[in-house]
């Protein structure tokens, strides 16, 4: 069919197939938006992949998908990009920055390093966070305090890794290895997309107790994990 041969009836029929008849259940009349079915529930026409859009591909890094079938009401969705699903691609200095922040935050708790690294990486490009790793590290709260362990004594000491000695030298080397593994894709996210974390018991006041009580933050399950930190996914992200 050429473009010039399309008539009003064909246009109206296409609109009805995409949006549904005016006022129909599950559809929306012209002038409002149709709600597309869940990507996970929309099966491919040939039944091969069970969905036209896969936000969590097997390799954990890049999404794959096919073109949506508009005749079945599938809405157009952007493909997930970047290593964290939010468009993040590591920059030249990011390995050192990531190593320093998990060294500073982890304070020798090596078991927590993968979770800490991924929680920081998951923030890049997220709704409430900057779109660069350096921006995330330097983000402050409403009182002007850094949200992460940026500019702490351990952060400053790690500016010259060769000056570190003893346990600090070993911890920084571990942090550097973890940072490299996370950024090259060899260490998967053990937190399932966490953005927030704390060590020890849940703080008695402030952001965490309120966000946890409201259901906004959900603790990430980590099988076999015995670290000092707890990690949380943000259900509003």
Image (cartoon, grey):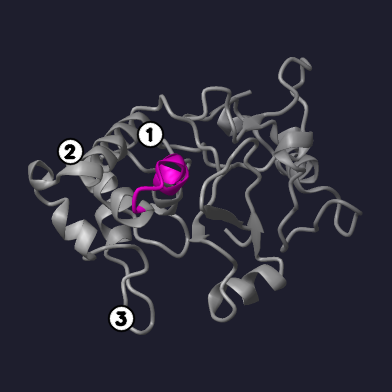
List the residue tagged with mark 1.
182
Q: Which mark is residue 144?
A: 3
Of residues 226 and 31, the one nearer the viewer is 226
Q: Which quarter of the rendered picture does the C terminus lie within?
A: bottom right
List the residue tagged with mark 2.
92
Q: Nearer the viewer, mark 3 or mark 2?
A: 3
Q: Nearer the viewer, mark 2 or mark 1?
A: 1
Q: Which mark is residue 49?
A: none
Measured in 3D between alpha carbons, the distance from the residue under mark 3 to the one under mark 1, in whole angstroms, is: 29 Å
Residue 86 in the image: state x and y as whole percent: 45, 46
Measured in 3D between alpha carbons, the distance from the residue under mark 2 to the one under mark 1, in whole angstroms, is: 14 Å
Marks 3 & 1, CB-CB < 8 Å contact: no
Residue 134 in the image: state x and y as whole percent: 25, 55
Q: Is residue 94 visible?
A: no
Specify which label sits upstream in the sequence, 2 or 1. 2
Per the rendered image, the range of residues in magenta is 107-118
Task: Judge whether residue 130 is colored magenta.
Answer: no
Magenta span: chief secondary structure:
helix
Left or right, residue 195 beside residue 15: left
Where 93 falls versus 71 (above or below)?
below
Task: Judge whether residue 117 is colored magenta.
Answer: yes
Q: Quadrant of residue 150?
A: bottom left
Where 143 falls versus 220 (above or below)?
below
Per the image, label 2 sits on a secondary structure element best described as loop
Specify which label sits upstream in the sequence, 3 or 2. 2
Q: Quadrant of residue 51?
A: top right
């Amino acid at each position: 069919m050429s473009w010039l041969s399309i008539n009003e009836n064909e246009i109206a029929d296409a609109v009805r197939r995409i949006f549904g008849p005016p006022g129909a259940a599950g559809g929306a009349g012209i002038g409002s938006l149709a709600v597309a079915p869940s990507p996970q529930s929309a099966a491919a026409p040939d039944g091969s992949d069970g969905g036209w859009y896969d936000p969590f591909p097997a390799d954990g890094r890049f999404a794959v998908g096919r073109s949506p079938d508009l005749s079945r009401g599938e809405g157009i969705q952007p493909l997930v990009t970047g290593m964290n699903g939010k468009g993040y691609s590591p920059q030249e200095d990011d390995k050192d920055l990531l190593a320093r922040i998990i060294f500073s935050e982890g304070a020798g708790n090596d078991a927590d390093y993968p979770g800490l690294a991924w929680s920081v990486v998951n923030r890049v490009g997220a709704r409430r966070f900057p779109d660069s790793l350096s921006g995330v590290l330097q983000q402050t709260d409403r009182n002007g305090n850094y949200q992460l362990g940026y500019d702490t004594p351990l952060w400053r000491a790690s500016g010259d890794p060769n000056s570190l000695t003893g346990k600090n030298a070993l911890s920084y080397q571990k942090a550097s290895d973890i940072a490299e593994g996370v950024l090259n894709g060899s260490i998967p996210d053990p937190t399932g997309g966490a953005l927030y974390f704390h060590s020890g018991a849940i703080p008695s006041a402030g952001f965490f107790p309120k966000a946890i009580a409201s259901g906004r933050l959900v603790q990430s399950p980590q099988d076999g994990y015995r670290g000092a930190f707890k990690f949380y996914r943000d259900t509003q992200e």
